[in-house]
Image (spheres, rainbow, N blue to C red):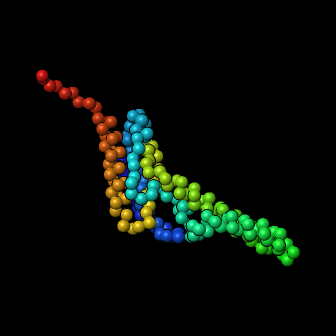
Amino acid sequence: MKVNITHSTEKRSRTLYYVNCRVDFSEEEKAVIRARTLGDHTVAFETGWLNMSPDAFTAIPTFLLDKGPRLFGVLAVVTFFVAPLITPFPFLICLGASGYLWYSRRKALKGLEATERTELKIKDIVDKPFNLSSASSAAIPPMEQEIADNLTYVKNLITATTEAPTEKVFEL
């Protein structure tokens, strides 16, 4: 088993610190995982957000994401009846702003839904990268330690299932 851990940061409305991990299992380990159906075992993460989408945080304030689409929708209806006498541009601007905010809110909510998971199945980390993220750089060492602990558990699980039982002789 070869583990590759890298760090990255991403600046959105706040800075997110990522600990990216990729586990490359040997062919023998993959065969053991498939043969012994170890892929359904899970490893849990308590530190950081698991596979946090960068779209979960936007530069748009939360209040505007929540109330903005409705507000601009109402303004679009009002300007539809009032502004056509002058020009249709206010209606189109309000309609566009409402649509953009609705889309941004939907994208942020989908990103947050994906982060509600705190467990990964072993089959989900076989040749697939995953990451833990946090809004604090101080959380990076605990996240690395948690990844190391979980992958040690996976390695021990694979090793324990490959060892043949030894014969024990005892006398009563």
- Which percent across, then down, holds residue 42? 41, 44
Q: Residue at x 60, y 59 (%)?
A: 107
Residue 17 image-quadrant placement:
bottom left
Q: Residue at x 61, y 65 (%)?
A: 65
Quarter of the image that includes the C terminus: top left
Q: Is residue 95 left or right of residue 146?
A: right
Q: Is residue 153 left or right of residue 78?
A: left
**Residue closest to the eye, 19 or 56:** 56
Q: Residue at x 26, y 30 (%)?
A: 165
Which residue lies most toward the bottom here?
86
Q: Residue at x 57, y 60 (%)?
A: 108
- Which percent across, then down, holds residue 103? 65, 61
Q: Is residue 84 left or right of residue 123?
A: right
Which residue lies most toward the left here?
172
Query: Does residue 129 appear in the picture of this structure?
Result: no
Placement of 90 over or under 52, stated as above or below: below
Which residue lies most toward the top here?
172
Placement of 162 over or under 147, stated as above or below: above
Residue 78 image-quadrant placement:
bottom right
Placement of 94 over or under 167, stated as above or below: below
**Residue closest to the eye, 2 or 52:** 52
Q: Is residue 113 left or right of residue 100?
A: left
- Which percent across, then down, holds residue 89? 79, 74
